[in-house]
Image (cartoon, rainbow, N blue to C red):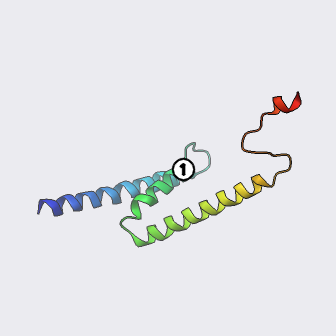
């Protein structure tokens, strides 16, 4: 009985905490309000995804979109003319 109560308490904390983070992320994403709104929103969805299927689908879609964005950014960076590597020492090349 204590184990079940503890499990229900943790589930309630995840739902309330995730919901609070989602609401805070939405508020922080509004124009004129400084703060990492998108990051807080994604963290809230991560918490809610352990309890709700809709949040898990949305969180998975956001992760896939983010990975695709990073992959595209990295492939574009390699195609940049004049770029030789991740760190380029311009002073040694000028001498």
Residue ID at (55%, 46%) = 36
Specify whether 5 is left or right of 52. Answer: left
Q: Which residue is mark 1?
A: 37
Residue toward you, 81 or 70 = 81
Asked which quadrant contains residue 15, the reply is: bottom left
Asked which quadrant contains residue 87, the reply is: top right
Residue toward you, 34 or 74 = 74
Residue ID at (88%, 27%) = 95
Rendering coords of residue 88 (x, y %): 77, 38
Task: Name the residue furthest right.
Answer: 95
Rendering coords of residue 61 (x, y %): 55, 68
Residue toward you, 95 or 40 = 95
Residue ID at (67%, 60%) = 71
- Secondary structure state at the residue bearing disc 1: helix
Badge 1 density bin: few <14, some 14–19, many ≥20, Cα 10 Å: many
Rendering coords of residue 20 (x, y %): 40, 54
Specify whether 11 is left or right of 18. Answer: left
């Amino acid at each position: 009985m204590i184990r079940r109560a503890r499990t229900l308490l943790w589930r309630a904390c995840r739902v309330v905490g995730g919901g609070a983070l989602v609401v805070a992320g939405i508020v922080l994403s509004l124009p004129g309000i400084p703060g990492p709104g998108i990051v807080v929103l994604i963290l809230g969805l991560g918490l809610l995804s352990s309890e709700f299927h809709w949040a898990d689908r949305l969180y998975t879609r956001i992760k896939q979109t983010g990975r695709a964005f990073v992959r595209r950014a990295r492939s574009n960076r390699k195609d940049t003319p004049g770029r030789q590597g991740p760190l380029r020492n311009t002073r040694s090349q000028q001498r």
